[in-house]
Image (cartoon, rainbow, N blue to C red):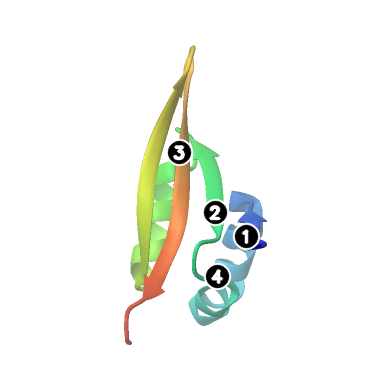
Amino acid sequence: MENNKTHTVDELRLLYSISPAKLRKHLKLNEKIYTDDDGISQLEGMLRNCKVIYELKTHDIPGRKVYEITIGEKQAI
């Protein structure tokens, strides 16, 4: 059985502020990140800068959108 970890946006912001390479190393295949409208643009920017491939799904909840990001393979740097 897979044990996929879920990350918080605050955790990833901290790692990215230390070093984008640290964030890149921290994320593993199929791990998930959940965020809302407030954090999605910054999170996508961090992942693009780290050349991490991800899949984005949007879940509509009354009055709010929740974004589910699933980590894919990392691109070669």
Look at 38% across and 73% down and name the residue there: 73
Three-letter code, disc 1? Asn
Q: Are marks 1 and 2 in contact (CB under 8 Å)?
A: yes
Q: Secondary structure at mark 2?
A: strand
Q: Secondary structure at mark 1?
A: loop
Mark pair 1, 2: CA separation: 7 Å
Q: Which residue is mark 3?
A: 67
Mark pair 1, 4: CA separation: 11 Å
Of marks 3 and 1, which one's residue comes earlier in the chain? 1
Report the disc number at residue 61: none
Of marks 1 and 2, which one's residue comes earlier in the chain? 1
Of marks 4 and 3, which one's residue comes earlier in the chain? 4
Q: Residues within 10 Å of mark 4 (few under 14, many from 20)?
A: many
Look at 55% across and 80% down and name the residue there: 25
Report the disc number at residue 27: 4
Image: 33 above or below 18: above
For residue 50, say whether it is visible. Answer: no
Mark pair 3, 1: CA separation: 17 Å
Q: Quadrant of the C terminus?
A: bottom left
Image quadrant assignment for residue 17: bottom right
Mark pair 3, 2: CA separation: 10 Å
Q: Secondary structure at mark 3?
A: strand
Q: Are marks 2 and 4 in contact (CB under 8 Å)?
A: no
Three-letter code, disc 3? Tyr
Whole-percent x and y of residue 8? 64, 51
Q: Which residue is mark 1?
A: 4
Of marks 1 and 4, which one's residue comes earlier in the chain? 1
Image: 5 above or below 74: above
Q: Nearer the viewer, residue 3 or 6?
A: 3
Report the disc number at residue 32: 2
